[in-house]
């Protein structure tokens, strides 16, 4: 087992498309989506402990340490390999907005699984880690696998899409927190949309079926999309929001657009990435 700290990026994701195509007997929705990473990241530092404890240096306000996804990921991994003597000190530098649809919690959990597999010398495969990750959240597997991907099922059935364009994005975070459960339980959400293919997506079929329900419930998201639409051809909502984004060919164009937007939005510029930077760091370590 390594004794050195390991510092890893935990990137955000965007949903470039989101379709709701059915519902399972357990109430979960059947989706089609496309995930792509961006270079906005949380950072997680893992330091092995010799006292068998899993501890979080700075718990999030209002989130008990034992409920934090990073702690849950570490304990799940430890339980899976049957070794309660493995310990780690977790330090999280949180940069991704919570509740924005950028996958911050899922990315942090996936980064924990990948990082601890390395420093604890567990030797689990990426597929094994992704299966574990699904117990923590539907978006965790895509971060574990680390490729932009077409997702089906609840988002866990993944087909890598390593050759997507990697534009620059302007991402806006409106001042609201979308209740994902309320969106998916809304009577106004259409749940039997027609399934499409990857070729349909590439040809431009890139709608988000949750968008009408989200904008009706949170008008500020619609206002943010309208503002971004002055610069981007087709602004989109990621997941169920609240973040919206637009694509640009170059960094300078994206930066200029961000500067021209209303100051009521929190805006940032990020590069699209088809390979997760988490994997890049682990592969070079």
Image (cartoon, grey):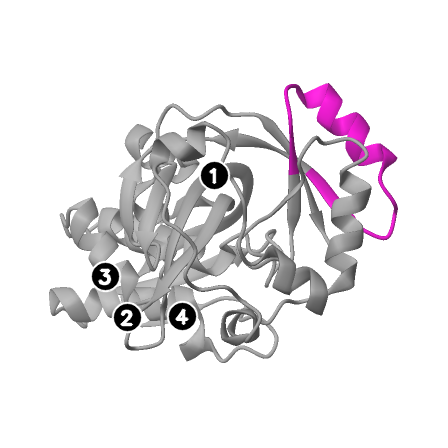
Residue at image coords 39%, 51%? 194
Contact (Cβ within 8 Å) of mark 1 with mark 4? no
Q: Which residue is mark 4?
A: 55
Q: Nearer the viewer, mark 2 or mark 3?
A: 3
Residue at image coords 28%, 45%? 158
Q: Which residue is mark 2?
A: 75
The quadrant the C terminus occupies is: top left
**Closer to the camera, 232 or 98?**
232
| SS for callout 2 | helix
Say which label, 1 or 4, has the lower sequence index: 1
Mark 1 closeness class: few <14, some 14–19, many ≥20 residues within 10 Å? many
Label for residue 132?
Answer: 3
Say which label, 2 or 3, has the lower sequence index: 2
**Closer to the camera, 196 or 57?**
196
Q: CA distance from mark 3 to mark 4?
A: 20 Å
**Bounds of the magenta segment:** 246-268
Label for residue 37?
Answer: 1
Contact (Cβ within 8 Å) of mark 2 with mark 3? no
Query: Where's residue 116, x and y in %?
Result: 28, 54
């Amino acid at each position: 087992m390594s004794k050195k700290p390991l510092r890893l990026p935990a990137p955000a994701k965007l949903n470039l498309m989101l379709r709701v195509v059915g519902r399972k007997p357990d109430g979960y929705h059947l989706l089609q989506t496309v995930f792509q990473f961006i270079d906005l990241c949380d950072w997680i530092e893992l330091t092995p402990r010799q006292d068998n404890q899993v501890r979080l240096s700075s718990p999030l306000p209002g989130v008990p340490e034992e409920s934090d996804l990073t702690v849950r990921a570490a304990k799940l991994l430890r339980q899976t390999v049957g070794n309660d003597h493995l310990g780690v000190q977790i330090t999280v530098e949180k940069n991704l907005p919570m509740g924005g649809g950028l996958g911050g919690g899922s990315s942090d959990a996936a980064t924990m699984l990948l990082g601890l597999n390395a420093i604890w010398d567990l030797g689990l495969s990426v597929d094994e880690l992704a299966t574990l990750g699904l117990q923590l959240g539907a978006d965790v597997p895509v971060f574990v696998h680390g490729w932009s991907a077409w997702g089906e099922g609840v988002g866990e059935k993944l087909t890598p899409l390593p050759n997507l364009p990697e534009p620059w994005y302007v991402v806006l975070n409106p001042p609201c927190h979308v209740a994902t459960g309320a969106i998916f339980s809304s009577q106004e959400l259409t749940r039997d949309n027609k399934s499409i293919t990857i070729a349909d997506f590439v040809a431009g079929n890139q709608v988000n079926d949750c968008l009408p329900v989200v904008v009706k419930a949170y008008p500020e998201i619609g206002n943010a999309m309208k503002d971004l639409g002055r610069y981007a051809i087709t602004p989109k909502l990621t997941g169920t929001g609240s973040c919206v984004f637009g694509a640009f060919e170059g960094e300078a164009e994206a930066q200029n657009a961000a500067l021209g937007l209303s100051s009521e939005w929190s805006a940032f510029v990020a590069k699209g990435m088809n390979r997760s930077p988490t994997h890049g760091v682990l592969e070079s370590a």
